[in-house]
Amino acid sequence: DAKTTQPPSMDCAEGRAANLPCNHSTISGNEYVYWYRQIHSQGPQYIIHGLKNNETNEMASLIITEDRKSSTLILPHATLRDTAVYYCIALQGAQKLVFGQGTRLTINP
Amino acid sequence: EAGVAQSPRYKIIEKRQSVAFWCNPISGHATLYWYQQILGQGPKLLIQFQNNGVVDDSQLPKDRFSAERLKGVDSTLKIQPAKLEDSAVYLCASSSAGYWETQYFGPGTRLLVL
């Protein structure tokens, strides 16, 4: 399964868009990119996933580059409640979720 | 829809004692997972159940950890005897099918071993 690389921490101002990058240069053609987040003292929460097309739901947008070697999670209007650790995971079929260190996103007022 | 329930939320024990955690998954979810999350790290899968059968327990320290899922619903994870390095948050998750389905996590049980 592909390994993902994320920056350890990021800051964003409240109300602005938060753009979280993820590199997955060894991703295979049938591996999906999943994003989960973990708010302090809570369990991880699913956000979004995609294969090759850009995806959007009520929480976020996922932009995957054409070569699929990297992706960006976009929180369009970040709020203080979006402060969390964000995990990018490459997953194929019946593979298990392997969480890395993630990106600690801090939303500042 | 009720989420994944876990209890207790916090537990403090001394090393060599035993401890048990309980998980009630989302109704109808066939797959149940137990994860261990050490401070500063991402969660690590310990064991996966499909209904009441074990699918993956490759990372479960079987000399001290055990888990069961009676009747394919609730599950318990036990540690006996506990070591200092078992201090962590133990997370339970469930999904409607296999690994590739969205997993829903409970709030976790925070264990401190003294």
Image (cartoon, rainbow, N blue to C red):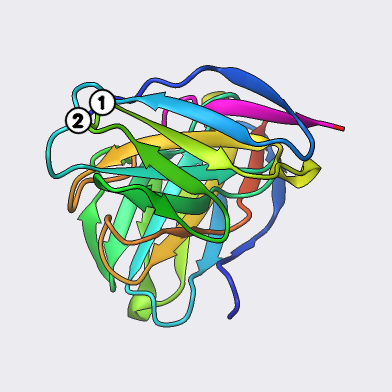
Q: Residue at x 34, y 77 (%)?
A: B72
Say which of A98 and A65 sits in front.
A65
Q: Are marks 1 and 2 in contact (CB under 8 Å)?
A: yes
Q: Which residues are magenta?
A: A98-108
Q: For the residue labelled by badge 2, is the local secondary structure a helix, a strand or a loop?
A: loop
Position of A105 with respect to A68 (left or right) is: right
Please tell me how crowded label 2 is: few (under 14), some (14-19), or many (20+) other residues with Cα within 10 Å. Answer: many
Estimate the x, y position of residue B6 in percent, counting from the top left: 60, 62
- Spot occupied by residue A20 in the image (x, y as percentages of width and height): 52, 30
Q: Is residue A95 magenta?
A: no
Q: Quadrant of residue A14?
A: top right
Dot 1 or dot 2: first in sequence order is 2
Residue of label 2: A27
Q: Amino acid at mark 2?
A: Ile
Q: Is residue A105 magenta?
A: yes
Question: Can see residue B61?
Answer: no
